[in-house]
Amino acid sequence: MEEKQAKELLDKYLSGDCTEREKAVVETWFNLQATKKESLGIADFDAINQRIMEGLPEGSVIRPTKAKLWPRLAVVASIALAVMVGGYYYYDSINENNIPQIAQQHDIAPGKDGATLTLADGRRILINDALAGNIASQSGVKIYKTADGQIIYEVTDQQSGSSQYNTLTTSAGEQTRVRLPDGSIVFLNAASSLKYPVSFAKSAARRVSLTGEGYFEIAKSFASIGGQRTRQSFVVESRGQQVEVLGTHFNINSYADEAEVATTLIEGSVKVSRAGKEVILKPGQQALNKENAFVVAAVDTESITDWKDGDFHFEHADFRSVMRKIGRWYNVEVVYDASVPDNITSNGLISRNNKLSEVLKSIEKAGEVHFRIQGNKVYVTK
C-alpha cells in the first residue's frame, strides 16, 4: 500500500464511508499503535490490510457518525501520515514512558461491594460475610441478600407500620445497593450511610437520611392513611436539606468534606428545600446548596453518576474534588505539597476497577502533577 492510499483509507474512515473490511484495517492498525513501543510504518499497515482482506467477507458500506468515533482515533488519523512515514509516534505523547513513573511501595486494589447493616435492635450484619438468602426478619419484613450482594427488603405483612429503623453503612473502599420496602432502589457510594424505616406502610411520607453519596431510583407508592388511599412522597434528608419526590431518579452528594450539597436530577422532578428556601429541578439540572443558598445549573449527568456505573468520569472537574473521590474509593489519604496550585482541573474517563496506580497515571499524563504512593497515603507534587 502506498503512502497516498493509506491516507485515503484513513480519510474514508473519518468520513464514515469505509466497508467493514476497511474499517477493520484502520482500527486494528490503531490498536497495535497503542500497544507497541515503536512506531508502525507502511509495511505494518500493509500486512494488516492483507491479513484482514484474506479473512473477512465482503461487507456493506458502514456510516458511523463522526461523534461516535473513538476520539483518540480521530486525532491519530489526522497525523497518521507522519506516523507511518516519518516515524513520529503520537501515542508516546501520552505514554507513561514520557512522564515520571509513579513512585510506589505497593499498589492499592480498587474498592469493592460491601456494607454493614445495623438492625433496629443493634445487631450488625457484615454483608460480605453473610450467605445469600434470608439474613434477618423484623416487624413483618424479611431482609435478603442476593447472590450479587444486593440487599432486598420484602414486606410480608402489609399492615405492619413499624417505626423501627435500619442503617446501611459503607466504609471507604466499599459500595452497595439496597431495595427498600417500597421497591425503591438506592445505590450507596463509599464512606456513606442510609438510615430508613423497616416499613413505610403507615407513613404519609417515606423519609430516609443520607450521609455521603447515594443514587436513588424512587418507586411510586401508596399508603392507607385514615382510611384513605394516599400517594406517598419520598423525602431524603442530608446535611440540613430535604429532597422531596414522588417517583424519579436522582443523585445526592452530601459528603461532609465537600463545600456544598449537590442534588442532581436524572429524570422526573424533585423539590429541594432548606431553611425556608426551595427550588424545583428539571432533568439534567443540579442544585448546589451552599451557605443556605441554592445555585441551579445544567450539568453532564454522566459525570455525576459515574460511580454507580463503575467509572471515574471527569469533565473540567476540580482536581481536589477528584482526589477526594479517589481517596474514598481506594481508602487512602491524599497529602498535597505546597507547590500544587488550587486551580487545577481534571478531564478523563477510567474504570473504578483499575488499581490505584493506573488511575493516577491517567491523571498524571496531563502533566500538571506527580504522585507517590506510600502505604495508604498518596503524595501529590507539582
Image: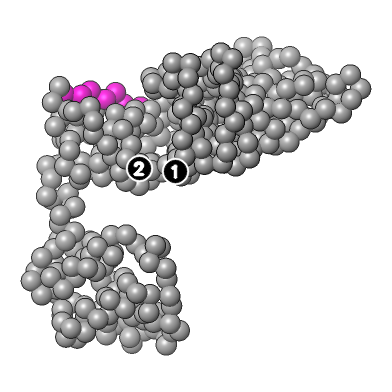
Q: Residue at x 41, y 30 (%)?
A: 173
Q: Which mark is residue 315?
A: 2
Judging by the rendered image, the residue that carries numbered circle 1 is 300
| Residue 340: x %, y % from top left | 17, 28
- Magenta range: 330-337
Q: Is residue 119 left or right of residue 226?
A: left
Residue 209 visible here: yes
Residue at figure coordinates x 33%, y 86% from the top left: 53
Q: Say which quarter of the image contains residue 380.
A: top left
Q: Under tag 2, what secondary structure?
A: strand
Q: CA distance from mark 1 to mark 2?
A: 8 Å
Question: Is the residue 317 above or below the residue 244 in the image?
Answer: below
Quarter of the picture holding the N terminus? bottom left
**Could you say which is closer to the camera, residue 267 or residue 214?**
267
In the image, farthest residue toward the left:
86
Q: How would you rate the neighbour count of disc 2 (Cα within 10 Å): few for under 14, some for 14-19, many for 20 or more? A: some
Instruction: Kindly identify the residue that appears in the image at 23 percent across and 23 percent down.
Output: 335
Asked if one can make out residue 151 in the rendered structure from this viewpoint, the answer is: no
- The answer to which of 290 and 8 lies nearer the viewer is 290
Residue in the picture at 71% in, 14% down: 164
* Colour logic: one colour
